[in-house]
Image: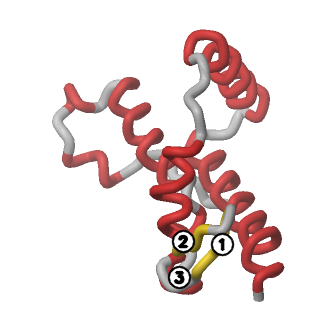
């Protein structure tokens, strides 16, 4: 139902030596990285620039809250311990579902957008 492409034509212009698993992983991480900020997917309120939120007595635009405040406020986790478990779960999930990464990315993007609309946008409207 998602019409997931068998190939990514945009990558056809790249040299063959660039079409390696590590390059694909970098491309996927760029896409996934943008999902950390759900307003990137939605035009509502200027992608978060036109909406003010208050947290702990401070005011931020929604965009600034996600882009500036949260990255500084969240302490880093131990990469060795947690990343190994995370990547095993991701690997198991990909193998279990037998779906392509791009299809899973689209499903995840839809879930993030729906959760954002339901849990953030709807309560403040």
CB-based contact (under 8 Å), mark 1 and mark 3: no
Residue found at the very far left of the displayed protein: 15
Q: Earlier in the sequence, mark 2 or mark 3?
A: 3
- Vertical order, 34 against 93 (above or below): below
Q: Horizontal and vertical percent for residue 39?
A: 56, 70
| 120 or 86, nearer to the observer | 120
- In the picture, the quarter occupied by the N terminus is bottom right
What residue is drawn where x is 72% and y is 67%? 116
Residue at which label 1 appears: 54
Q: Earlier in the sequence, mark 1 or mark 2?
A: 1
Q: CA distance from mark 1 to mark 2?
A: 6 Å
What residue is drawn where x is 82% and y is 79%? 123
Q: Horizontal and vertical percent for residue 92?
A: 73, 22
Residue at which label 3 appears: 43
SS label for mark 1: strand
SS label for mark 3: loop
| 82 or 73, nearer to the observer | 73
Q: Is residue 39 left or right of residue 20?
A: right
Q: CA distance from mark 2 to mark 3?
A: 18 Å
Question: Callout 2: 10 Å neighbours few (<14), some, many (20+)?
Answer: some
User: Mark 2, mark 3: which one is toward the viewer?
Assistant: 2
| 34 or 49, nearer to the observer | 49
CB-based contact (under 8 Å), mark 1 and mark 2: yes
Q: Is residue 5 left or right of residue 108?
A: left
Q: Earlier in the sequence, mark 1 or mark 3?
A: 3
CB-based contact (under 8 Å), mark 2 and mark 3: no
Colouring mode (rainbow / by chain / secondary structure / one colour): secondary structure
User: Mark 1, mark 3: which one is toward the viewer?
Assistant: 1
- In the picture, the quarter occupied by the C terminus is bottom right
Residue at which label 2 appears: 60
Q: Horizontal and vertical percent for residue 109?
A: 63, 58
């Amino acid at each position: 139902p998602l019409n997931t492409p068998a190939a990514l034509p945009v990558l056809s212009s790249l040299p063959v030596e660039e079409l390696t698993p590590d390059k694909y992983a970098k491309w996927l991480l760029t896409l996934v990285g943008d999902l950390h900020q759900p307003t990137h997917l939605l035009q509502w309120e200027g992608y978060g620039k036109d909406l003010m939120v208050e947290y702990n007595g401070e005011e931020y635009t929604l965009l600034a809250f996600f882009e500036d405040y949260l990255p500084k406020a969240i302490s880093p986790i131990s990469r060795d311990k947690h990343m190994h478990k995370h990547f095993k779960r991701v690997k198991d999930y990909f193998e279990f579902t037998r779906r392509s990464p791009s299809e899973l990315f689209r499903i995840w993007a839809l879930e993030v957008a729906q959760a954002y609309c339901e849990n953030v946008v709807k309560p403040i409207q």
